[in-house]
Amino acid sequence: MIKRSVVLGCGSYLPQRLVTNAELANRIDTSDEWIVQRTGIRQRHIAADGEFTSHLAINAARAALRSADIDPQSIELIVLATSTPDNTFPATAVAVQNGLGITHGAAFDLQAVCSGFVFALATADNFLRTGAYKRALVIGAETFSRILDWNDRGTCVLFGDGAGALVLEAQDLPGTSADRGVLTTHLRSDGRHKSKLYVDGGPSSTQTVGHLRMEGREVFKHAVGMITDVIVDAFNATSLTAEDINWFVPHQANKRIIDASAHKLHIAPEKVVLTVDRHGNTSAASIPLALDVAVKDGRIKKGDLVLLEAMGGGFTWGSALVRW
Ligand code: ACO
């Protein structure tokens, strides 16, 4: 028997305010047609004034705890992936821990931009498999609307706000690929690509928060290769194949990147969970938001093999295979 991190529940939260492409086109020189054709995005949710990343995260965490049907006090570890924390410090995870009324165990943030959720999942999985903790909350939560340059049509149309969370529990299982839980995770990074996707401010450099800057075409060029490489690593580590996958739940940056990745990996289009049309790119929140949609609508069921992947600023990229 070995320890596996098994998903007990998931939940998500989207801010109320919905911003359509048409509304953006009233403010900047863009069009619904351009945005849909290049990205697949039709709308995004934007946090209200005074609504912080921690508020979105707490709502998502509460929903995940309800779906797991467990006592919040049994959570010993909270790993929150975000690039848009409430404050430079303390960690937003600690605000979430406090909001849930938990004062034991550990809570910390993890920063890997759009790959943050996969990195957070891998981190929590490693703590659970060593036996350090029994139950963990893994959260992706973002308010990217706060770091966008709303006059830059090349970036501001792409992103949205939201949060999603999973509850994981360490369980002793046989150790085969038929086990439930996180079967494998693979993380990568390469700082040579910083200038292609970054925020032009920070506490140590400018003492400001800064705005997101991106060479979209350059990011696009690298995305599919990096994504498919790290998924092949996951297949090689488990002897599972694209045929075995029930659901592909990629980071939701751009429909064209998702379609091209699925095509290259021979993953059938009907197995791809797509939410970028409704949510935009919510960075670290996009995977758990998409997971929650597919669980709620009955697609992802207990025992299904789910493939996750993400690529983002850094560059960072990663994959995970999870049997639900
Ligand atoms: N509306 C209308 N026109 C626009 C807009 C807009 N919102 N944005 C740019 N344009 C114009 C440009 O000015 C340019 O005009 P020009 O030819 O007159 O100079 C033209 O459209 C083409 O611009 P490109 O940037 O070359 O357009 P491209 O086809 O590359 O599409 C896009 C841009 C959608 C950003 C694409 O490059 C992309 O998706 N890249 C990947 C980005 C991504 O996924 N980032 C996130 C991954 S990591 C993470 O999630 C943080």
Image (cartoon, rainbow, N blue to C red):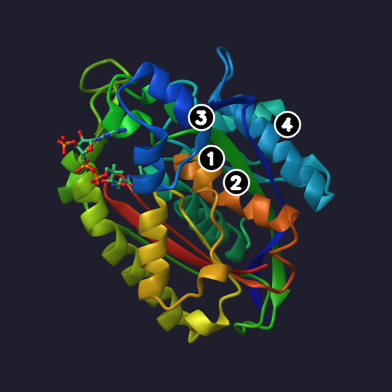
Of the residues under marks 1 and 3, which one precedes in the sequence?
Answer: 3
Which residue corresponds to mark 4? 100
Do the CB atoms of the residues marked 2 and 1 lie less than 8 Å apart? Answer: yes
Vertical arrangement, residue 105 with respect to residue 84, above or below: below
Give the left or right position of residue 101, taking residue 207 as reference: right
Do the CB atoms of the residues marked 3 and 2 lie less than 8 Å apart? Answer: no
Q: Is residue 136 shown to the viewer in this render?
A: no
Q: Which mark is residue 289?
A: 2
Question: Residue 77 placed where, x, y %?
Answer: 63, 46
**Residue drawn 37% across and 24% down?**
147
Q: Nearer the viewer, mark 4 or mark 2?
A: 2
Vertical arrangement, residue 2 with respect to residue 191, above or below: below
Q: Amino acid at mark 4?
A: Leu
Of the residues under marks 4 and 2, which one precedes in the sequence?
Answer: 4
Q: Nearer the viewer, mark 2 or mark 1?
A: 1
Mark 2, Cα crowd under 10 Å, few <14 / some 14-19 / many 20+, is many
Q: Nearer the viewer, mark 1 or mark 3?
A: 3
**Residue drawn 50% across and 22% down?**
86
Gap in angstroms between the C-alphas marked 3 and 2: 19 Å
Give the left or right position of residue 116, taking residue 53 as reference: left
Question: Residue 19 placed where, x, y %?
Answer: 52, 26
Of the residues under marks 2 and 1, which one precedes in the sequence?
Answer: 1
Q: Amino acid at mark 1?
A: His
Question: Residue 132 placed where, x, y %?
Answer: 61, 57
Which residue corresponds to mark 1? 279
**Residue drawn 30% across and 63% down?**
224
Q: Which SS class for mark 4?
A: loop
Give the left or right position of residue 92, taking residue 28 as reference: right
